Amino acid sequence: MQQTLTDEFVFNHEDGKKNRQILTDDAVAFLRELVVRFAPKRTALLAERTLCQREYDAGKCPSFSSEMDSIKKSDWTIRGIPRDLQDRRVEITGPVDRKMVINALNANVNVFMADFEDSLAPEWDKLIDGQINLRDAVRGTISYTNEAGKIYQLQPNPAVLICRVRGLHLPEKHVTWRSEPIPGCLFDFALYFFHNAEALLAKGSGPYFYLPKTQSWREAAWWSEVFSYAEDRFNMPRGTIKATLLIETLPAVFQMDEILWSLRDHIVGLNCGRWDYIFSYIKTLRQHPDRVLPDRQSVTMDKGFLDAYSRLLIRTCHRRGAFAMGGMAAFIPSKDRERNAWVLNKVRADKEREAANGHDGTWIAHPGLADTVREVFDQALGERHNQLDVRRDEDAPITADMLLAPCDGERTEAGMRANIRVAVQYIEAWISGNGCVPIYGLMEDAATAEIARTSIWQWIRHQKTLSNGEVVTVALFRRMLGEELRVIQEELGDQRFSQGRFEEATRLMERITTESELVEFLTLPGYRLLA
């Protein structure tokens, strides 16, 4: 059905009862207001990203700016943190399907980040279902019955709910304004806020958001304007909306003070989005032959540039009274006792490092990790709810060189082949409508698949050599792609392989890995293959 509103605001989707639950006249009117007021500035901000990337491609590196030195050198703090967000030691993330929402809110965690971004393939039905699921969760009425008749319901005292909207770059093609897709982030924000803000406030919580993929303080300021407009529109006090912003791009790490200042009425913390950060490091410095990373498995948080990023984020946030959240543990528990012990030990070591650095909490992707991670942070925090008192004032300054230094490690044939298998399987799942996929013991989302394919692109671009002496070329990649596709078929079986969309996924993988210009996000061409 095509529904046309004034000023060329058009919905392209099949009408139905589900849609009418969410796309009420008043909700659509609010969404339209936001799009008309804020979409043009968002377009300008994306153009700024392109201009900055051209400078990086020409040899410049991101660095600290003196533009807002007076703000960086002065003493100020953010507006404040609500009571139910004071303790965030364990956060779980995942997509907004009904069973996942219930299980995540019932897990032994403090916060559930319901994700419309990297772990969701944004099919129209999934977006609408996700909004319905979160609406029902906020009201405590959500339930789910599986095929065997098992009923899932919310337990008392569920985790605090935070909604992650899509990144600034992602469109919502099912709704157009002036013949262009509207920003996906405004679609997600408008509908969640409209349907849930008052109910959340009535139960002692609030409309809380995670903001991904930010690259500059100007983008953070744009969000502050969106939030303030929404608060004024519904007669809510300034600072009602609270956000945690992910520092998961290389340019943003140099602007953390400026980002906190720009969102000071609404921000409660920053998060070390480690996987996207590694992807952004590769993408931002793609034309720099001296800054090529090794195998993905070698790029861990104890490496220099990632450890510096973690420590700088903690120091910056705590100086301003904001939380410094740790990154994702993507491991999945195993039914094999020996393998599971290995997984839990890896996770424990990672989280002990984060807690010792001073992070206030951390992320997990699976409820089975919650007890282990909670034990680590319980021990570190003691009677405290957080580690805002850990200031790291005695640290030596974190320099731009430290944040830009590539880490050591080999580029191996096995690592390249693993990248191919992970990326192809993830792309196939994503274009089939599944954005969060267990592959080889890890919960993969768009960020990890991005690392896999951009690593190979950069190795090809700079003719890097694998540890076995082979130069990485387009021809070598194409040969491995064909061979690894057969491995995937053997692993999954002929039936699953033939019923999937592996041919399309392979074509997309081949294109985005070999084109002369790096494709910014695999989800953009992937979106054209999605319903």
Image (cartoon, rainbow, N blue to C red):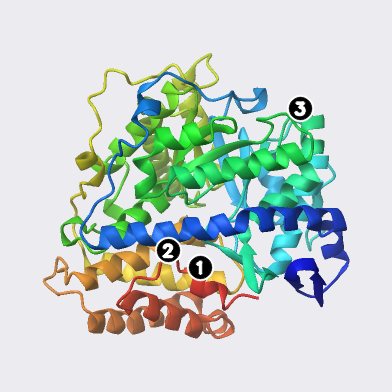
Q: Quadrant of residue 482?
A: bottom left
User: Which amino acid lies under the numbered mark 3 shown in the image of this protein?
Assistant: Gly
Q: Is residue 384 left or right of residue 315?
A: right
Is 432 drawn above or below residue 368 in the view shown? below
Of the image marks 2 and 1, the number of the one nearer the N terminus: 2
The kind of secondary structure element at disc 1 is: helix
> Between marks 3 and 2, how big is the CA–CA gap?
38 Å
| Residue at x 58%, y 24% (from the top left corner) | 79
Can I make out residue 150 in this image? Answer: no
Residue 204: mark in rendering: 3
From the viewer's perspective, is the residue at label 2 or at label 1 nearer?
Answer: 1
Q: Is residue 455 left or right of residue 4?
A: left
The kind of secondary structure element at disc 2 is: helix
376 or 53, nearer to the observer: 53
> Between marks 2 and 1, how big is the CA–CA gap?
10 Å
Of the image marks 3 and 1, the number of the one nearer the N terminus: 3
